[in-house]
Amino acid sequence: MKKIVFLDGDGTLWYPRLTKRKRPPHWIYSDPVTSKDPNNHLTLTPSTLRVLKRLKGSGVKLAVLSIIPHPRKEAMEILRRRVDHFHLAKYFDELYPVAEHPDSKGKLIEKVLKKERISKKDAIMVGDSYTYDYKSAVKRGIPAVLIHWESYGAPKAARVRRRIKHLYEAMKYIM
């Protein structure tokens, strides 16, 4: 069983209600209609609550890593409000807003693992972006799972060892 699970926010834990994973979720933050209050236009992905309850009950540490292109303090407040909006705070040990850079999540995961003295093999990253979630972790030797939403594509399966269609399928790689 993994000791810590890093979960992406947009597209993995929540997504825009209007598109339901038919296009990458970040559009919601720049659209004139939804950008003023994006939280009210988001909904949890199927099985999010079930997965979080099970993982928290098993004693696994949980962390959200979400790209929020704002200054650190503001980004943390945005992420905290988003997690609170869905009443998810009780499930997470840590919230990590990260910069919009392909390596930002992998670098942060390494830093957290070093600080917590957790080996890479005892951690896992679960996300829906090949570049920002999967590749960023795997290139640093951290196991990862890619949630593949058919509608907005991902690279060929040959480059992705762990590909799933729903968040609950990640449990087989965590437990």
Image (spheres, rainbow, N blue to C red):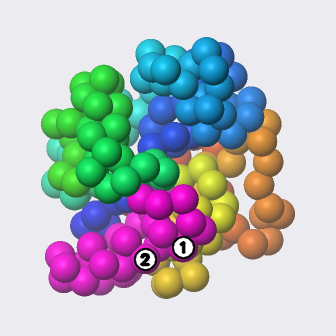
Q: For the view shown, which residue lies furthest in the right direction?
A: 156
**Residue type at tag 1:** Asp
Q: From this view, report whether residue 115 is shown above or below residue 42.
A: below
- Can residue 140 be seen from the camera position used here? yes
- Which residue occupies 57% across, 19% down? 34
- Left or right of residue 53, residue 128 in this image: right
Q: Which quadrant of the rendered structure holds the N terminus? A: bottom left
Q: Residue at x 79, y 71 (%)?
A: 158
- Report the disc number at residue 103: 1
Instruction: Say if the magenta span includes residue 112.
Output: yes
Q: Pointers 2 and 1 in contact (CB under 8 A)? A: yes
The three-letter amino acid code for the residue at tag 2 is: Lys
Q: Is residue 171 visible?
A: no
Q: Which mark is residue 175?
A: none
Left or right: where 153 falls relative to 9:
right
Q: Residues within 10 Å of mark 1 (few under 14, many from 20)?
A: some
The span shown in magenta is 97-126
Left or right of 135 in this view: 117: left
Give the residue at x 69% y 67%.
160
Q: Residue 134's image quarter?
A: bottom right
Within 10 Å of disc 2 (Cα), the crowding (few <14, some 14-19, many 20+) is some
Q: Nearer the viewer, residue 173 or 86?
A: 86
Question: Within the magenta stretch, is there residue 105?
Answer: yes
Depth order, front residue of 133/70: 70
The alpha-carbon separation of the residues under discs 2 and 1 comes to: 6 Å
**62 shown above or below 57:** below
**Could you tell me residue 101's position as x and y percent?**
56, 66
Q: Position of residue 81 (x, y in %)?
A: 29, 31
Helix, strand, or loop for circle 1? loop
Q: Which mark is residue 107?
A: 2
